[in-house]
Image (cartoon, coloured by chain):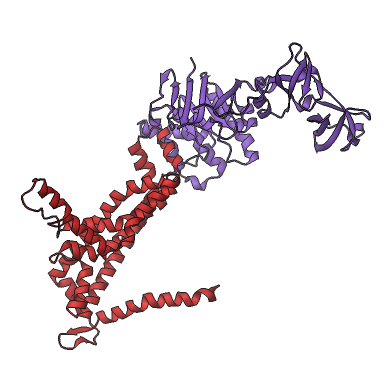
Chain colours: A red, B purple
């Protein structure tokens, strides 16, 4: 058996690990405007990323947007996931497909949809202007709110599906038992459903947080030129600035912080609720 | 008026009827069993009492108060679920204390009452365990303790023994009955196991396809069944279709003329109900019956018989080793008899028809 799975495993390992190692090596190189990349072993790129107030701000924005979007996705996703998990029969398949449906459309296309909705000539502003409720278009686009809306729309299916898989495993009768013992619906949720759903909350939040931290299309298209998150910043260094070493360092900082936060987050949750 | 009253209680889902109409009056401290095959509406009836299913007709009264439209948390019932439904993330102590917490009972009294009830169900010292660390029997007793600790006005048991192995089931059955009697709990138990119902309940309600077929004590149901369904469901019974030809004479559908306990009247389709233990068998070379099969069951022996085309089952104490009965083998001719009074005449089974929507 081991002999059968070994070749494929090695290939996967190679495909996953080799680019990372290469990227890490690049991040230690130096950049010269004339020679592009110069072989070196220095932490200068990392120091610059941490010390430069601009990149510190980009990182903070990324963290704030990712945290906010994750919490919003959790708040919106839980009721939907619960409803989906407790659904019966053929309506359940239909509802599951409906939740999955947005995933059939790429991020860029979905962001374009938000543009058509929120833009100055978009559906909302056109309607309000047409009704004479506003004199000038509302600035709905190119702000943090638009980016968060775009991101949540992208990550919500992942949150809902992860949560509902766990909620389905919560015996309905434990909820009935709690109600039978005198618990009101909100108490049933707080004392019986939520504690049993915590593994799903942890898994869904980690998955969604990682996706949010690496947001690209929503940030660029809905945030506009002034709005910067980490993934677009990495792209800029590689493609526009041709500064591969600094771009690689930014990528590793993004990776490291995401990793540390998700591990710490799920460990804290696990300790608190023994799940 | 009883402490639990079901008044013309019914439940329909669209045009299909889950419970047609249940009228029941459970006295304070009485244990009543809802008995019937799966799909007969017994669980739906119990869930209407707990408030998990909203009735489409009739009323539920607990302690004289109408709770038909009250949500589950506002009803004073304590339910033991078939799956126990223990809270897996809470310790045994927290599980049992949950209902007391919901009733805003102070910590000191809560702890005291949890300790008492755990002693009652012989689980003292296991407060800090998680449910998954307990055996099935122990989990079942936690579920009992959790429902008992709040002193519910009505105690509800939904097939509480079906997840236990056969040996444990017998023990727990006696334990629950003893607790129920000692605490004077008004109890409704749902079961499909007639032995469980017969041994635990003061009265039984036999249900079939959403209807109550008969309400009575174990003796009532076994010795005086109201219809062929009850006769066949409670204990084993020979049920023969036919008609009463003359007073005391029953003509089976296959043509045999049999004695029965109906000294008056004649005519009309009927069912003859004859308990197997009332059928006597004896070797007789010129007997009208024929032995089809013999099953030795230790203290008892079953005889599968053919009487002029009619199949009959007889169950007799196993005869001694020297008895000629022991040498009977399939195909032998036998004589078959019973006391006419033991053969009860019941109304013919209603033809299957959908209840009108």
Q: Is residue B70 left or right of residue B205?
A: left
The answer to whether any part of residue B203 appears in the image is: no
Q: Relative to B129, does residue A16 appear above or below in the rendering?
A: below
Instruction: Name the residue at 41% across, 44% down.
Output: A86
Quadrant of the image occupied by residue B182: top right
User: Residue B117: image x %, image y %?
Assistant: 49, 32
Toward the top, the furthest residue is B264
Q: Relative to A32, does residue B158 appear above or below in the rendering?
A: above
User: Residue A77: image x %, image y %?
Assistant: 31, 50
Q: Relative to B7, does residue A113 appear above or below in the rendering?
A: below
The answer to whether any part of residue B279 appears in the image is: yes
Instruction: Name the residue at 87% across, 38% down.
Output: B330
Q: Is residue A104 left or right of residue A59?
A: right
Q: Relative to B287, does residue A202 appear above or below in the rendering?
A: below
Front residue of B27/A159: it is A159
Quadrant of the image occupied by residue B64: top left
Instruction: Name the residue at 62% across, 41% down.
Output: B165
Toward the right, the furthest residue is B285
Front residue of A186/B233: it is B233
Instruction: Name the residue at 21% across, 87% down.
Output: A38
Front residue of A35/A133: it is A133
Quadrant of the image occupied by residue A53: bottom left
User: Residue A234: image x %, image y %?
Assistant: 22, 73
Toward the left, the furthest residue is A135
Count of marks overlaid on the render? 0
């Amino acid at each position: 058996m081991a002999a059968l799975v070994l070749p494929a495993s090695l290939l996967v390992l190679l495909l996953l690990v080799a680019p990372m190692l290469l990227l890490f090596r690049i991040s230690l190189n130096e950049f010269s405007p004339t020679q592009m990349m110069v072989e070196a072993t220095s932490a200068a790129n990392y120091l610059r990323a941490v010390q430069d107030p601009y990149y510190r701000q980009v990182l903070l924005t990324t963290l704030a947007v990712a945290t906010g979007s994750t919490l919003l996705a959790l708040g919106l996703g839980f009721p939907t996931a619960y409803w989906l998990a407790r659904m019966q029969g053929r309506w359940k398949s239909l509802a599951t497909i409906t939740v999955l449906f947005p995933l059939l459309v790429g991020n860029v296309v979905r962001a374009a949809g938000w543009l058509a909705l929120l833009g100055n000539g978009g559906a909302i502003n056109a309607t309000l202007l047409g009704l004479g409720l506003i004199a000038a278009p509302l600035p709905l686009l190119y702000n943090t709110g638009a980016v968060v809306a775009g991101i949540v729309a992208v990550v919500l299916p992942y949150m809902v599906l992860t949560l509902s898989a766990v909620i389905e495993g919560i015996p309905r009768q434990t909820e009935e038992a709690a109600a039978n013992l005198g618990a009101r619906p909100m108490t049933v949720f707080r004392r019986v459903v939520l504690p049993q759903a915590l593994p799903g909350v942890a898994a869904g939040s980690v998955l969604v947080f990682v996706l949010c931290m690496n947001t690209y299309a929503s940030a660029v298209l809905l945030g506009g030129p002034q709005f910067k998150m980490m993934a677009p910043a990495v792209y800029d260094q590689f493609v526009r600035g041709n500064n591969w070493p600094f771009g690689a360092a930014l990528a590793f900082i993004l990776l490291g912080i995401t990793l540390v936060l998700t591990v710490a987050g799920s460990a804290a949750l696990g300790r608190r609720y023994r799940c | 008026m009883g402490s639990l009253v079901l008044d013309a209680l019914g439940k329909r889902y669209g045009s299909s009827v889950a419970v047609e109409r249940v009228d029941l009056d459970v006295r304070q401290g009485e244990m009543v069993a809802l008995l019937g095959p799966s799909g007969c509406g017994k669980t739906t009836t119990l869930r209407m009492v707990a408030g998990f299913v909203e009735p489409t007709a009739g009323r539920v009264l607990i302690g004289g108060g109408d709770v038909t439209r009250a949500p589950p948390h506002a009803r004073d019932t304590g339910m033991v679920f078939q799956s126990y439904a223990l809270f897996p993330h809470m310790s045994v102590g927290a599980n049992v204390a949950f209902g007391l917490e919901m009733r805003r009972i102070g910590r000191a009294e809560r702890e005291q009452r949890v300790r008492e009830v755990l002693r009652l169900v012989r689980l003292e010292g296991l407060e800090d365990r998680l449910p998954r660390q307990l055996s099935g029997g122990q989990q079942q007793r936690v579920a009992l303790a959790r429902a008992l600790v709040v002193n519910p006005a009505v105690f509800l048991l939904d097939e509480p023994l079906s997840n236990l192995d056969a040996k444990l089931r017998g023990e727990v059955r006696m334990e629950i009955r003893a607790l129920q009697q000692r605490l004077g709990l008004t109890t409704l138990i749902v079961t499909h196991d007639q032995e469980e119902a017969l041994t635990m309940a003061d009265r039984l309600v036999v249900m079939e396809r959403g209807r109550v077929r008969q309400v009575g004590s174990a003796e009532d149901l076994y010795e005086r069944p109201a219809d062929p369904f009850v006769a066949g469901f409670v204990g084993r019974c020979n049920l023969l279709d036919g008609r009463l030809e003359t007073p005391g004479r029953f003509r089976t559908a296959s043509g045999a003329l049999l004695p029965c306990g109906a000294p008056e009247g004649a005519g009309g389709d009927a069912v003859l109900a004859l308990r197997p233990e009332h059928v006597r068998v004896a070797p007789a070379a010129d007997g009208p019956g024929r032995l089809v099969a013999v099953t030795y069951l230790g203290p008892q022996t079953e005889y599968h018989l053919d009487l002029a085309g009619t199949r009959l089952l007889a169950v007799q104490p196993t005869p001694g080793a020297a008895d000629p009965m022991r040498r009977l083998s399939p195909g032998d001719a036998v004589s078959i008899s019973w006391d006419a009074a033991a053969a009860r005449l019941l109304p013919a089974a209603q033809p299957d028809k959908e209840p009108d929507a």
